[in-house]
Amino acid sequence: MRRVLVISSYLLVALLASCGTVIWADSRPTALPPLLQGIPLSLRMTEGVSPEFTQRLSNRFPPGSSETALIRELWLNGFRPDTDLGASQRGASVTFLGNLSYICRRDAYVSWSAESGKLTAISGTFVQTCS
């Protein structure tokens, strides 16, 4: 009886250690790409737009900038198109799993319009959602 109790105790410790390791390994956030680094996650947004992210995008890609350069930069930062690139309002998004990824995720979305390959408007949203 004592031997069964000792073995059961060891199994319980091993199980708890394994679970702790999984949670610890999963709690490391996914590194953000350069375009999003340093941008605070918005809980406050103005009409669905993150002011800090929109400002960074506008500084880097002002009106008249090449749409091709924007699309390339977004692609290199992990964004993928959400709309047809021929649409009047175009968009691309990316999702990153944050700390304890089964609870929280970070979503970034860039919306823009262009004429003749030149940007006319751009905005961005960067939010964290936890369930």
Image (cartoon, rainbow, N blue to C red):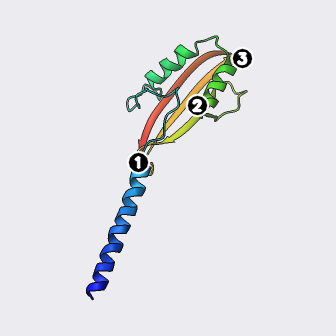
State the residue lying farthest toward the left: 2
Residue 77, disc: 2
Gap in angstroms between the C-alphas marked 2 and 3: 20 Å
Quarter of the rendering containing residue 60: top right
- For this view, does 103 lie left or right of residue 10? right
The residue under label 3 is which amino acid type? Gly
Question: x, y (%) of residue 23?
Answer: 40, 54
The residue under label 2 is which amino acid type? Asn
> Residue sitting at 43 percent across and 38 percent down?
128
Residue 120, disc: none
Q: Does label 1 or label 2 sit earlier along the sequence? A: 1
Question: x, y (%) of residue 43?
Answer: 38, 33
Of residues 130 and 27, which is closer to you in this image?
A: 27
Dot 3, crowdedness within 10 Å: few (<14), some or many (≥20)? few
Gap in angstroms between the C-alphas marked 1 and 3: 41 Å
Of residues 81 and 17, which is closer to you in this image?
A: 17
Kindly indicate whether the residue at mark 3 contacts the one at mark 2 (C-beta within 8 angstroms): no
Q: Which residue is mark 3?
A: 117
Quarter of the rendering containing residue 42: top left
Q: Which residue is mark 1?
A: 27
> Residue sitting at 52 percent across and 33 percent down?
108
Foreground mark, 2 or 3? Answer: 2
Query: How many marks are shown on the rendered structure?
Result: 3
17 shown above or below 77: below
Quarter of the rendering containing residue 62: top right
Gap in angstroms between the C-alphas marked 1 and 2: 22 Å
64 shown above or below 36: above
Q: Does label 1 or label 3 sit earlier along the sequence? A: 1
